[in-house]
Amino acid sequence: MLFLDLETNGDLNNDDFEYEDEAKLVIFPDHYEIPLPNIEELPALVTIACDAVLSSKSPYRKQDPDSWEEELQVSKHAKTLVQIDNGVRIPPSGWKCSKCDLRENLWLNLTDGSVLCGKWFFDGSGGNGHALEHYKEMGYPLAVKLGTITPDGADVYSFDEEEAVLDPHIAKHLAHFGIDMLQMHVTENGLRDNNIKPRVSEWEVIQESGVKLKPMYGPGYTGMKNLGNSCYLSAVLQAIFSIPEFQRAYVGNLPRIFDYSPLDPTQDFNTQMAKLGHGLLSGQYSKPPMKSELIEQVMKEEHKPQHSGISPRMFKAFVSKGHPEFSSNRQQDAQEFFLHLINLVEHISIKVPILQVTLCGQTSVSPHRCQWQLPGSCRALPAQTNMWPFGQNPSDVFRFLVEERTQCCQSRKVRYTERVDNLMQLPVAMEAATNKDELIAYELKRREAEAARRPPPELVRAKIPFSACLQAFSEPENVEDFWSSALQAKSAGVKTSRFASFPEYLVVQIKKFTFGLDWIPQKLDVSVDMPDLLDINHLRATGLQPGEEELPDIVPPIIIPDDPKVSSLVALDIDESSVMQLAEMGFPLEACRKAVYYTGNMGAEVAFNWIIAHMEEPDFAEPLAIPGYGGVASAGAAGLGAIGLDNQPPEEMVALITSMGFQRNVAIQALKATNNNLEHALDWIFSHPEPEEESESASDVMDMENNANANILAEAGSEGPRIKDGSGRYELFGFISHMGTSTMSGHYVSHLKKEGRWVIYNDLKVCASERPPRDLGYIYFYRRIPS
C-alpha cells in the first residue's frame, strides 16, 4: 500500500508563523518514507501518480472555490464618522424604505438615519437600490443592514470602499438613533426589544426555540454540517435514510458496493450514497462527549452540546454536478432536490457485468487486479450480466400510478391516461380557513401598526383543514389550450386525478409556494392540521365507467412553417401518446414533440422534465428541427432510415448518456448505430460491453472496468413501471419544514419519528423533539399501515 503523507508545519490561521508544505511517499507496512519530488528513485508511473495527487483539488476546494472569504477590514470612516443630530429614532420593527414600500433588504444610513432599500438581485429579490442612490447624492458612506443587529455586532457596508466592513464603534453609532445594541437580537423580520411581546415566528416554532432539547447520540442520530445553504440537502437525506429499503440497499450492501466501485469512487453515485448512509447510520460520528470534556467545558463556562456529525461535501459535489441550481451555493427547494435525488436513484441501476479473466488463470469480477502484475497480459472478457444482489430499486417505494381523466366539456367524451409519480402535491385551500375573522382583524391591526410605525401585532396564521386540501386535490381542474380529438379543434376541458396505485411510502408536499403579481416567489404562512393517520382509499381510480365514451385517438395536426428550406421532411419515431399527454397539460404542441424527441421516447414524465428545463428558451415553441439535417419533424411518417448514420448525434442525447457514466465516444457510437434513439442506444450499449477495436492493452482492461461499474439506466418500456400497490392507509413518520419567505432563502429542518419518539434534525444538531410542529411542515412522509 502506498500513502502520501502531507505534513504542514505551523498554524495556517496565525499570521505570526511561516509555514511550509512537505510531501512524502510512504510505503507500508514498513513505513518507508521517500521525500517528494524524487525523480531519481521512483519509477516514472509512480512519479506521475504522485504529481497528479499533489496537483489535484480536493472535493472541498472544488465545491467551494470562492468560499474562502477575506477577513473583513475596519472601515476608514468608522472612527471619524459624522452623525447628524436630527432627532431620528428607529423603531424596533415595522420598517419600510422611505422612497418605496419595500420591507426587505433595508439599510440604515449611520449618518442621517435614513432607512432605504438595497440593490436589486438577478433573481428578483433585493430592492430598488435607493440606499446606493442616497450615498451618491449625499456622500454618507456607512450603512447597517436592519435585521442583523445583535449584541455581537451587525452587518455594515461601506459605499465608499465598496465592500462589507467592520465598525468598532457600531454600538455608539446605533445608540445615536435610539438602538440599544445589547438589548437587541435577531428575529425573522429583524430587531426585537426584550420589552416587546415576542412574536410566534415560524423560525422559533419549527426549531423549537426556547425549549431545552436533549441531544441524541448513536446510530441514526447523526447530524450533517451545513455547507452554506445546504440544509435542503441534509433534511431530505435524513428522511431518505430513515427508510429501511434505502438502508438495506446502500448501507446493508456497503462492502459489495465498495468492491464494485470504480477507480474514481468520487464519481460513483452508489459509492457516495453508501458512504453517506454509513456515516448517518453507523453511529461513529455521533458519540456523546467524554466526562473529561464536559468538566473542561464547565470550567471554561462554555458548556454547549457538541455535535460531531458528517460533512456531505463530496456527495453534494457529485449529485449537483452539472445542475445549474444545485451546483450553486444558493438556497434551493427541498421538493425539487428530493425529485432530483429519486431520479438519480431510479436511473442508476445496480447491475454490472461479471467478468471472466483469462491468461492469468483467475476468475473474478471487475475491477480485476492481475496477480502477475503484467500490464496487457490479462484480458477481461464479458461472461454474463447479472443484477447485484441488492434486491429491488429502493426508489420503487415512492412510485405510484396516477390516473388522469380528461373530459371534453362540449362533446362530454373522456380520455383516461396513466403516469408515474413519486410525490403527491396538495394545494392550500385558503378559502377554507377556519379563522377568517381573526385574519381580517390581524390584517387591520398590522396596517395600523405600519402607519403608526409601531411594532406589529402578534402573528395570526390561517388555519387550513387538511380535508379541504385533500378536497381541492380531487376536484376537477381546467385544462388550458385543450385540443379535443372529438371536435378536432380546441375546446374547454377538465381533468381529474386519482390514484391508480398506492405506494409503500407516500410523500405529500403542501404547495405553500406561489408567485405574486410581480412574479416574485412568495410563501403562504399557513397552518395545516396534518393527520398522524391518513386514509386515501376513497381516491382510488375507477377507470372507464359504463356510459362513458372515449375521445378518438387522433393526433393533433402538425403545423409546418411555409419555408422552402424545410420542404423535405424527416421521418422520426416519436411517441405520439406522450405528445398528447403533454399537449393536454397546456404546453405548445411543437414543444411537446421536441421534448419527447430529445428524451428518446422515454415517456411523458421524462419529457415533462425537459419542458420545465427549456421552457424559457426563445425557440421553445418553434417546430422541431433536426440538428445537422435542416429538416422539421413530421407526424405520421414512419421509419428511421432518413437520418444518416454519419450525422453527429444531438448533443443533448450525448450529454444524457455520458451523465450516466459512459464514455463520450461510446455514447456517440451507440446513438449513431441506433439512429439517435436514446432507448435503443442504451440497449445497444448493454449488448456491446466490449470495445469494437480488439486490443490487448491495459487501457482496454481499464475501460472495461469503468464500463462495468458505470451508472446504467434502469429497465424501462416493455416491462412497464415497477409499482407496488396496496392499501391507502398510512401513518406519519417524518416531515421537512421550511422557514423563510421563499425557496430562494430561509432554512430547512426535518423531524423524524424514531423508536416511538420525535427527533429534530437541524444541521449538526440532533435532539429529542418536545413540540414537533406538524402543522407547519412543507413535505410529509407517510408509511403504509400493514393490512
Image (cartoon, rainbow, N blue to C red):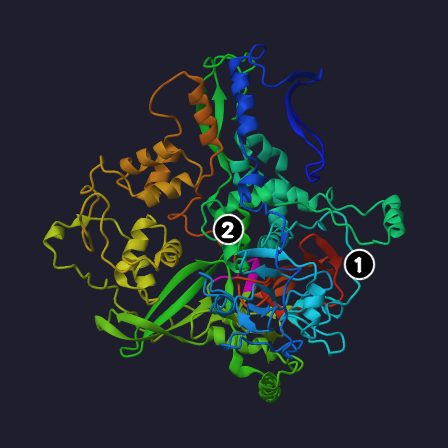
Q: Picture coordinates of residue 779 (x, y %)?
A: 58, 63
> 10 Å neighbourhood of mark 2: few (<14), some, or many (≥20)?
some
> 10 Å neighbourhood of mark 1: few (<14), some, or many (≥20)?
few
Q: Amino acid at mark 1?
A: Lys
Which residue corresponds to the image point at 58% horizontal and 18% vertical from the top-left?
Answer: 37
Quadrant for the N terminus, please: top right
Q: Is residue 596 magenta?
A: no
Q: Picture coordinates of residue 743 (x, y %)?
A: 53, 63
Element under disc 1:
loop
Quadrant for the C terminus, please: bottom right
* 387 sits left or right of 762 in the view: left
Which residue matches tag 2?
328
* Picture disc at residue 214: 1
Q: Could you tell me how far apart the alpha carbons at marks 2 and 1 are, in whole angstroms?
A: 34 Å
* Picture disc at residue 175: none
> Would you place residue 694 above or below residue 561 in this image?
above
The part of the chain drawn in magenta is 501-508
> Would you place residue 350 above or below residue 123 in this image?
above
Given residues 465 and 497, the one toward you in this image is 465
